[in-house]
Amino acid sequence: MMEEVRNIVLLSHSGAGKTSLAEAFLFNTKEIARLGKVEEGNTVSDYSPEEIERRISLNLSLLHCHYNETKINFLDVPGYGDFVGETISGLTAAEAGILIIDAVSGIEVGTERAYNLLKERQLPFFIFVNKLDKENTDFARVVEIIRKEFGREYFPLQYPLGKGGDFKQAIDILSSDIKKLSGEDKQKAEEWRKKIIETAAESDDALLEKYLEESELSPEEISQGLRKAIAERKIIPIFCGSVLKNISVDCLLKAIVDFCSSPQSSNEKPWKDSPFSGQIFKTISDPYVGQLSLFKVFSGELVSNSGFYNSSKKEKERIGSLYFLQGKEQKPTSKVEAGDLGAVAKLKNSHTGDSICDEKNPVTFPQIEFPHPLISLALKPKLSKDEAKISDSLTKLTHENPTFQISRDQQTKELIISGMGNLCLEIALSRLKREFKLEIEVGEPKIAYKETIISRTEVQGKYKRQSGGHGQYGDVWLKLEPLERSKGFEFVNKIVGGKIPRQYIPAIEKGIKQAMSEGVLAGYPLIDLKVTVYDGSFHSVDSSDLAFQIAAAMALRKGALEAKPALLEPIVEVEIDAPNEYMGDINSGLSSKRGRIMGLEGKKIKAIVPLAEMAHYAADLKSVTGGRGSFSMKFSHYEVVPQKISEKIIEQNKK
């Protein structure tokens, strides 16, 4: 039943022990017979060749176990920032989270990123302080750091008995086990116990009234208050242990069952007897079954060998087998019920984020919002015969990871791949070679510069050829004027008195556009230009469309060179989010990139910067902020390139 399901996302900084914790959950609940290790590349969760080779999680992995008659689905998501899209997918399917913190390293960049994502989505969660068996760990110090950085609503429900190599057990400070502690540890634990009970009592009026009268609550009442306080994020409980020594793993499982909300009590309100509705939150390319779509059922149930309506695409889908996933293992099931997470293979038109439902009762859930990619590479196959294959292969990768995108630059004709960071693109290129047997050449994307004119001019273009029989004759006078930025191109016909027959006007416009596409400075297209044809002449026998097309192109090139041509570069709007202590360095860095600060809003800087200066900004910002800064950018407009830089670009193009 829905009350007996928990969907939990596991988050951490890379290397804090999240995947090892998932492995311990499976081992302790007898889902697996042997405890795998990340270092040995044999965990259930990290199974792709790239994950095994690099010993880090790169993809969302769906696992499940059963504890005290409750099914727990775990979504193990990467801790590396390049794969934040996987984390967002996992958060979409979960009702609660566990944020794992390394007791030695404390709060790291990935910890902050995960915390911010949990906070944005207002998802209840626990903190698990791992690796307390390591030397030089101090649980009390870690708790104080957590409360200082994240807030005063963080309370430890456990306290370690012993330190470093002597750490053997985590004490439940709400139980009689607190007596096992001594000295300063016991005093601190008793102080936490009192604060937790007070906060739990404050979550419910009846409990608060009793607590004020009697100064104590029963264990059942404390649990009742805690459950409500955790759901409302008034308490974020802190647990502690060691995954390596299997300390506190069962305590966490019990806490998930006791304190985490079921899908039934979540905001989505999934009802078993309602018509089917759900959402695809992740797509996987499986080497054996093809595309595998992971989905969450919000209401009703989905039965194998049936179908559903994709309300996002307005299309019907037929389905075959349904599965529950255990990492890469697919366990067939006859149905997936409300609140649960399942998978289906070979959907034709349904992808991540799509809402799926009963056709007679259409439902559309909010689209999953993924961040825009930050860095790009241009690539092409080494063999021309692989041109079509590479596009198909890249499309499959974009379905898996919505923060990985492909595009074709219409001006430079380059195929562009974009992602959240260098590692994201490295993995994509590795998979193209390994899975799709493609050899690729990569490089920096070309900047789509453009050209324009600064002043006005009037110019003649005359084309006259005689080579026996009919000749060629075309004669035009053009007026060239600059337009406001982003206005494009405007063609005006002011021929009167039949000086140029009407049938040749389209050829004149065609010749102008052809010459504009080739530019006059460095081969970039001319834009923001108004061209008026106002005079000319023709020959009754020798004039033709081709002659007037050539004459117009000659006039355009000549006139553009006379009208002070200038190079234009794309400018992007950049929004940077970083802690206040880095603002000075970030501002200086933007200034060195010819950026202009447009405003400051809290921890966010808004600026406009030439796109050519942003190629390596992801790495620059990471270096300045230690990975604590993030940014987004989007195209804004074109601006004239400074003279010295323009000269260098023109010279490079000539070479």
Image (cartoon, rainbow, N blue to C red):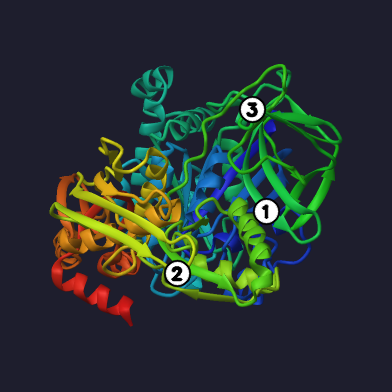
Report the residue at 40% width, 38% height from top: 235
Where's the N terminus, which quadrant?
top right
Q: Disc 3, disc 2: CB below 8 Å?
A: no
Dot 1 falls on a residue whose secondary structure is strand
Q: Which residue is identified by label 2?
A: 467
Type of amino acid under label 2: Ser
Answer yes or no: is residue 574 visible: no
Type of amino acid under label 3: Ser
Closer-to-camera residue (409/623): 409
Where's the C terminus, which quadrant?
bottom left
Residue 630 falls in which quadrant of the image? Answer: bottom left
Dot 3 falls on a residue whose secondary structure is loop
Is tag 3's residue or tag 1's residue first in the polypeptide sequence? 1
Q: Nearer the viewer, mark 1 or mark 2?
A: 2
Image height of 436 relative to 250, above or below = below
Give neighbour class at mark 1: few <14, some 14-19, many 20+ (Cα, 10 Å).
Answer: many
Q: Which residue is identified by label 1?
A: 284
Q: Residue furthest front?
A: 469
Q: Disc 1, disc 2: CB below 8 Å?
A: no
Q: Position of residue 201 (x, y in %)?
A: 40, 27
